[in-house]
Image: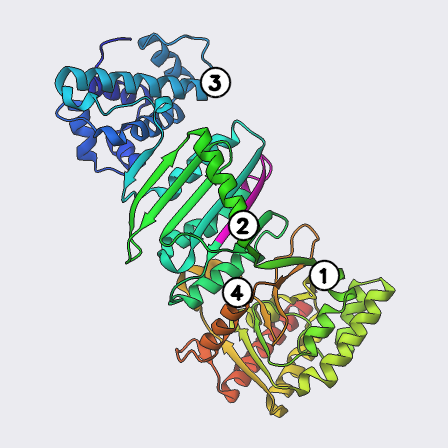
Amino acid sequence: MKNITFGYLLEKLLYFSKQKKTALARELGYDVSYISKWTSGKNLPIPKNINEICEITSTFITNSLTEETTNDLKEYFEIEKNIDIRKDLEDCLGELLKEAYIYTSQKSIPIQSKEVYREEDCNGIIHVNPKLRKQYLDRDIEKYISKSNTLNLIVSINLNKIGQSDKISIADIKEYLYNKREDIDAKAKILIGFDGDNEDIVFNTIMLINMISMYPSMNFEVYNCEVGYGTIISVVKDYVLFATNFTKDKSCLLSTMSRDKSIIEDMYYSLESILKKQGSLIFEKKLLIDIIKEKTYTQYFMTQDLRWLIGSMSEIFMPPDLYIEVAESIFKDKEVLEELSKINIVLQNITYKSKVKVLIYASELKRYMSSGKISFFNTPIELTFEQRKRHINYLNNIIINSENIEVKLVDGDFIEYFKDYKNPSLYLSKNIKLIQTDHEDNISDYAIIKDKEFKAMCDEFYKTIWEDDRDIIVSDKEEILEILNKELTYASIINEEFSNKI
């Protein structure tokens, strides 16, 4: 259909898709008054944004169509009826919108037409202070997945030069790709620079621990690597490039997007080259069995300056007989059991008599006492009430009698944003630093922190939260014992009621 104005076309597309201007405005990130001016013909979008507007609009309209309205739309706009694939229809509508824009701008505002390009002739699109950067990347990944069964992603950021919302958008990529694992074989490499003042030490460290510990089966690597200040670069190999620049106050200035294949290829392999020459892998994943057999765990408990952040109750502070009891119920490998027995001896005779700082999430204690669920060497198992009672009584005894072991409870969240995430578990010492990863598909991994800069960051993080003077830290011994005894009493009542019902 030729010689149709942009506003009239947009109005008709909304009509056939049964969508309102407000819905399109939300999708585009504009005020609805802009959409009204476009459809009325009073104004046109500015040229530098038109390609993105046409793309988002065509996707939005196509996704809103039913089979019946699709046929009506094709008939009205004289679109070939054999175009059945939604992606083809989406591309067709995008072209119609661009043609209508060029026709309208030439007809009413000639000066604008000089700046309008079809996407295939255009190297990049710039968004000034965009509010939908993450949405752009997610949408492009979604489109790429529909065309391919593999995805290679590289992201480059400087952690201390961008705001928290932008850090979160990068951290969330792992969960997004994990949820798409049945559709695509995804590989992601995140290059992180630590230059600058680490004012967000607690936020940054917890975010990185979550990135490392969540979904351990994913092919997801994090590197310490010198990268550009105040810039996020995201490259989906063979498909799209995003580059976002930030001001000194960490506000987004602009984002540039390109689908020029030569530029995407150059940037992808440029980042790969920087990674190989300068990158330091932040962590190494190790299977539980290897951690035990290679004596890494034993060595850890024999080192100095032990500091624990316990987000998941484990073998720590188990009485020696309960420890062996649980170990023998899980593991059958003789070599593994022998090594676990040695670790038990080290814990009882060295570790629990050494100086140790311990932070335990109170919410985890409550969950453990009510459910009995525990991660024994990162292997899930459910303990009976009597076993839990022995465990907590032993911890009580250590708190009361030990002069070397300092225990504090974390009764809340250090960072509000992460309150719905699993509590992190971090085991630090002078030489060895471990992160307990999520248990997934019967795989029990640990992440050994390898990078020196991230090791130092974890040390500083622990010092910061240990000295935290907010109400969320419970350091008084009597108060801690009271909390433990309350939870034990509550669990005893529940257990007794349950036993009576049986």
Q: Residue sitting at 34 percent across and 26 percent down?
A: 122
The residue that label 1 is drawn on is 288
The residue that label 4 is drawn on is 454
Q: Are marks 4 and 3 in contact (CB under 8 Å)?
A: no
Which type of secondary structure does the marked residue at label 2 adopt?
A: helix
The tag on residue 85 is 3
Q: Is residue 344 above or below residue 502?
A: below
Image quarter (top left, top right, bottom left or bottom right) of the N terminus: top left
For disc 1, the neighbor class at 10 Å (few under 14, some 14 to 19, many from 20) is some
The tag on residue 275 is 2
- Nearest to the eye among marks 1 and 4: give it: 4
Q: Are marks 1 and 4 in contact (CB under 8 Å)?
A: no
Q: Residue sitting at 38 percent across and 40 percent down?
A: 135
Rendering quarter of residue 130: top left
Q: Which residues are magenta?
A: 179-191
Instruction: Return the disc, 1 or 4, that comes first in the chain's sequence.
Output: 1
- Nearest to the eye among marks 1 and 2: give it: 2
Q: Are marks 1 and 2 in contact (CB under 8 Å)?
A: no
